[in-house]
Each structure stands twice: as structure tokens, then as C-alpha cells.
Image: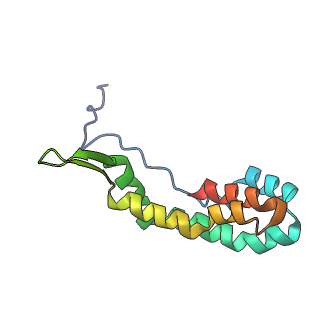
Amino acid sequence: MSDPPPSSAYSGFFQTPPALRNPYTQDPLLQRILRRRLPASLLTQLTPTFTALATESLSPEKRSYLDDTRHILPQVIVWDGWGKRKDELRTPEGWRKLKEFWAESGMMEDMYTRAYGTNSRLVGFTKFLFL
């Protein structure tokens, strides 16, 4: 018996990546916490929003933005080429797009406008889990 040939970048063993599932619908602990802490009518009202937000966060478009943020870090440009103070922050497109997605989610609005009364922060933090 001989050993199998060693693996390389192009042959041998390749592990299949895990399938990403909806973090709202597939997390039983989160479901239990929300059922316990939110009124049933509010949870029924917010379930489509949570499901859609969690699904959107796993879309290929949002995943590519996330990859962009991991590979291209923001830069602070302190001086220009002529020695003048600039103090400019340059961020890649992925950072800007994810910031838009974060703003569209309404997470901060939920926490600070208190649209859901005493449950507003819980609603906001639940949205934060998907962003």
C-alpha cells in the first residue's frame, strides 16, 4: 500500500465550504429569546423585516462588499504631495456600500427614536446581528 499523493493548491483534498443559512430563521436560540422578550404581535410584525434583512446580508453582492472590506483597508492621507496638510480618509467601495446597507436597515433609528417603545433597543440589536 502506498500513500496517496500529497495535496496541493490544484489537486488532492478540497474541503467544501459550509453553506450559509439565514441567521434569523435558522437560529433557534435567537427565536427563543425574541419570543420571550418581545410581544407576540410585535414579533409577528417584525419577522418579515428580520427575515429579509438576514437574507439580504447573505446575498452575493453584500458578501463581495464584505470581502472588499477585508482586503482593502481604509487609509488616512495626512499630507499631499506638496507637503500640505490633507487629513483625508479614503475608504474602498465595499465600506461605503455596507455603510449604506447599515443605514437602510434602520438599526440606529430603531434604537434612538424609540419607535417600538421599551423594545426598541432589542429590535435594533437584533438587526445588528445580521449586518
Where is residue 32 shown, x and y percent of the image?
Answer: 81, 54
Quarter of the view holding residue 54: bottom right
Where is residue 129 shown, x and y percent of the image?
Answer: 62, 54
Q: Which residue of the protein is positioned furthest toward the front in this rendering?
A: 84
1, above or below 91, in the image:
above
Q: Is residue 60 visible?
A: no
Q: Quadrant of the N terminus?
A: top left
Q: Is residue 120 visible?
A: yes
Seen from the viewer's position, the closer of residues 28 and 37 is: 37
How many numbered discs? Answer: 0
Where is residue 39 shown, x and y percent of the image?
Answer: 88, 65
Q: Quadrant of the C terminus?
A: bottom right
The reply, left or right, for residue 114 in relation to residue 11 is right
Where is residue 33 shown, x and y percent of the image?
Answer: 80, 52
The reply, left or right, for residue 40 in relation to residue 93 is right
Q: Which residue is pictured at 74% across the width and 56% down the height?
A: 121
Q: Which residue is pictured at 29% across the width and 25% down the height?
A: 2
Q: Which residue is pictured at 83% across the width and 59% down the height?
A: 118
The reply, left or right, for residue 13 in relation to residue 20 is left
60, above or below 6, in the image:
below
Seen from the viewer's position, the closer of residues 33 and 107 is: 107
30, above or below 11, in the image:
below
Q: Which residue is pictured at 61% across the width and 61% down the height?
A: 22
Seen from the viewer's position, the closer of residues 29 and 128 is: 128
Quarter of the view holding residue 48: bottom right
